[in-house]
């Protein structure tokens, strides 16, 4: 018996983008609902992330939009809450500053206005303290390098985490002054 290649592609069981165990063939709305619920089980996600997941599984756009709207109505998808949660988590876990957080939120598909509103809640004093703690935690690993090298590495670390150059320079200078107060300056040290 010959099979038509087009009909084989139309069969969800032959679709490499669908996992028959995780994405059973059938009603696209039911498949999309299962995908969304599974994605939201492990952590909150932005609407854009969920839309990408549905598109990757070839869920029709109208079905995806309808379900995402419904999930938003019942509070399962909330970009503002996602942004606040993401900021809190990334600040606590990685010590990221506002600039790096804004970049990550854009990558997650959060619109500029929602990201700005969430980032407005970041306290500059807390951000400064977080940078100070990051430097303080890194200082012991730099005990054997001269002051200029330590300063360069610490400022670079803070820059990669999104801290402004002026703030990074101030904090590193202050922490090095406290940490190395009893160590004589080297020939290249100011």
Image (tube, grey):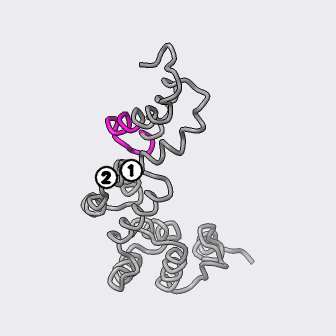
**Magenta region: which residues?**
159-171
Q: Secondary structure at mark 2?
A: helix
The residue that disc 1 covers is 129
Give residue 51's quadrant in the image: bottom left
Q: Is residue 122 above or below residue 7?
A: above
Q: Is residue 158 left or right of residue 113?
A: right
User: Which one is nearer the viewer's eye here, 14 or 48?
Assistant: 48
Q: Is residue 150 left or right of residue 18?
A: left
Query: Residue at position x 47%, y 74% from top?
Result: 59
Give residue 82's quadrant in the image: bottom left
Residue 19 position within the rendered picture, expressed as x and y whole percent measured from the top left: 64, 73
Q: Is residue 66 above or below residue 96?
A: below
User: Which one is nearer the viewer's eye here, 16 or 116?
Assistant: 116
| Residue 125: image tag | 2
Q: Please, what is the dominant secondary structure of the magenta stretch?
A: helix
Query: Residue at position x 43%, y 74% from top?
Result: 60
Label 1, residues with CA under 10 Å away: few <14, some 14-19, many ≥20: some
Quarter containing the N terminus: bottom right
Query: Residue at position x 39%, y 73% from top?
Result: 61
Query: Residue at position x 32%, y 83% from top?
Result: 73
Quarter containing the C terminus: top left
Q: Is residue 148 magenta?
A: no
| Residue that protrudes farthest toward the front in the picture | 182
Residue 6 position within the rendered picture, expressed as x and y whole percent measured from the top left: 59, 70
Disc 1 + disc 2, Cβ < 8 Å: yes
Residue 4 position within the rendered picture, expressed as x and y whole percent measured from the top left: 64, 72
Q: Secondary structure at mark 1?
A: helix
| Residue that protrudes farthest toward the right in the picture | 1
Q: Is residue 117 above or below residue 99?
A: below
């Amino acid at each position: 018996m010959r099979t038509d290649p087009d009909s084989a592609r139309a069969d969800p069981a032959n679709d490499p983008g669908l996992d028959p165990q995780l994405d059973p063939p059938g009603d696209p709305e039911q498949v999309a609902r299962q995908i969304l619920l599974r994605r939201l089980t492990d952590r909150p996600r932005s609407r854009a992330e969920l839309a990408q997941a549905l598109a990757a599984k070839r869920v029709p756009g109208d079905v995806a939009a309808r379900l995402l709207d419904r999930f938003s109505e019942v509070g399962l998808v909330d970009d503002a809450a996602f942004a606040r949660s993401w900021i809190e988590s990334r600040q606590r876990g990685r010590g990221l500053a506002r600039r790096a957080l804004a970049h990550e939120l854009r990558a997650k598909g959060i619109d500029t206005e929602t990201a700005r509103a969430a980032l407005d809640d970041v306290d500059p004093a807390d951000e400064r303290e977080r940078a100070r703690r990051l430097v303080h935690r890194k200082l012991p690993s730099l005990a054997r390098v001269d002051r200029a090298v330590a300063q360069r590495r610490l400022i670079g670390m803070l820059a990669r985490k999104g801290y402004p150059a002026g703030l990074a320079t101030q904090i590193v200078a202050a922490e090095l002054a406290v940490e190395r107060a009893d160590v004589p300056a080297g020939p290249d040290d100011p």
